[in-house]
Image (tube, helix red, strand yellow):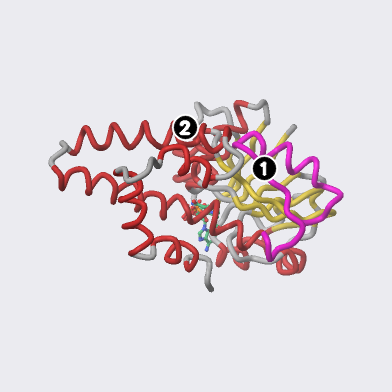
Amino acid sequence: MRLTFLGNGTMAEAMISRLLKSGYEIEVFGRDEKKLSIFRDKFDKKIEVFTYKNDTDISGKTVILCVKPHALDKVSPFLEGEARLIISVLAGTSIETLKQKIKAKNHIRAMPNIAATYGKSMTTITGDKASKDEAVKILNSIGKALWVESEKELDIATILAGSAPAFLALVAESLMDGAVKEGLKRDDAFTLIKGLFEGFAELLEKYSHPAFIKDAVMSPGGVTAKGYAALEKHKVRSAFMETFKK
Ligand SMILES: NC(=O)c1ccc[n+]([C@@H]2O[C@H](COP(=O)([O-])OP(=O)(O)OC[C@H]3O[C@@H](n4cnc5c(N)ncnc54)[C@H](OP(=O)(O)O)[C@@H]3O)[C@@H](O)[C@H]2O)c1
């Protein structure tokens, strides 16, 4: 199956690298011929690249919209015809807006994250139900896709799946700094933190609730209990909950 990307930035690159592995054919439209040529070379010329023309025909195509949100108004006037399906990854751009700007039988909003590069994006999706199965299949190629029933849920999930890597980076860095402060070499702290995050993903799969992981490692009067109490004292839990506030 052929997918048409509009946009040749970071997210397009991350998604295309996995979609090619899943056997999709890819064509990419962008505005800068030089950048497009460099982009094509990143994939050993396995993709086709084109610049937008005034009558860029998207009739019957499955289009992945991957430009900056503000660029929607710049790109949409180039497009002619009605796509089969539009999957937009544009943050904060509603399905209603997409429907006004780009004609398609079905419109889907998806929120991937940059872990798509490694096939590990947790992607939330919503939109026209008729294309649910197809959109889930395409986005499962870049990790795991989760369908939600409304755009409100997608916006909340965006913070969890899209912004939380930045929050977890702060957690990783802080834990490393704590260990370095006590005298561990930074390289060793980094090695340990990478192993911790890798193992932790498996623990989350195994346990039915994160609190059970805490219970499993916290022994009475032990160092974990003391550390945990320090996190609660400094309101780390409520700080994380506030990251969802608009
Ligand atoms: N990066 C993430 O982690 C992430 C996560 C979830 C969703 N997203 C969404 O993915 C989309 C792309 O983000 P990105 O990180 O890939 O950004 P990016 O690397 O900056 O790429 C942006 C793309 O938009 C194009 N563009 C920008 N202004 C344009 C204009 N005026 N006319 C036509 N094209 C224009 C750029 O073209 P040029 O290369 O020619 O400038 C480029 O192809 C955004 O809508 C973002 O909300 C990103």
Pinpoint residue 224: horizontal percent, then vertical percent. Answer: 34, 44
Disc 2 vs disc 1: Cβ atoms closer than 8 Å? no
Q: Which mark is residue 41?
A: 2
Closest to the camera, between mark 2 and mark 1, is 1
The three-letter amino acid code for the residue at tag 1 is Ala
Residue 141 located within the stretch drawn in magenta: yes
Of 240 and 26, the residue lying toward us: 240
Residue 244 located within the stretch drawn in magenta: no
Q: Is residue 36 left or right of residue 82?
A: left
Of 239 and 112, the residue lying toward us: 239
Of 146 and 24, the residue lying toward us: 146
Mark 2 vs 1, N-terminal side: 2
Q: Quadrant of the N terminus?
A: top right
Pinpoint residue 3: horizontal percent, then vertical percent. Answer: 69, 39
Q: Is residue 29 left or right of residue 232?
A: right
Pinpoint residue 105: horizontal percent, then vertical percent. Answer: 85, 54
Residue drawn at x 58%, y 57% is 158
| Residue 81 in sight here | no
- Kindly report the distance in space between the C-alpha atoms of the residues bearing marks 2 and 1: 28 Å
Q: Bin the neighbour count of mark 1 within 10 Å (Cα to Cα): few under 14, some 14-19, many 20 and up.
A: many
When the figure is inspected, residue 69 is found, relative to residue 180, above or below; the finding is below
Residue drawn at x 80%, y 41% is 133
Residue drawn at x 79%, y 59% is 103
| Residue 64 in sight here | yes
Q: Is residue 220 left or right of residue 119?
A: left
Pinpoint residue 23: horizontal percent, then vertical percent. Answer: 67, 26
When the figure is inspected, residue 70 is found, relative to residue 176, above or below; the finding is below
The three-letter amino acid code for the residue at tag 2 is Asp
Residue wearing tag 1: 145
Q: Is mark 2 within 8 Å of ligand 1?
A: no
Residue drawn at x 52%, y 53% is 162
Q: Which residues are magenta?
A: 127-153
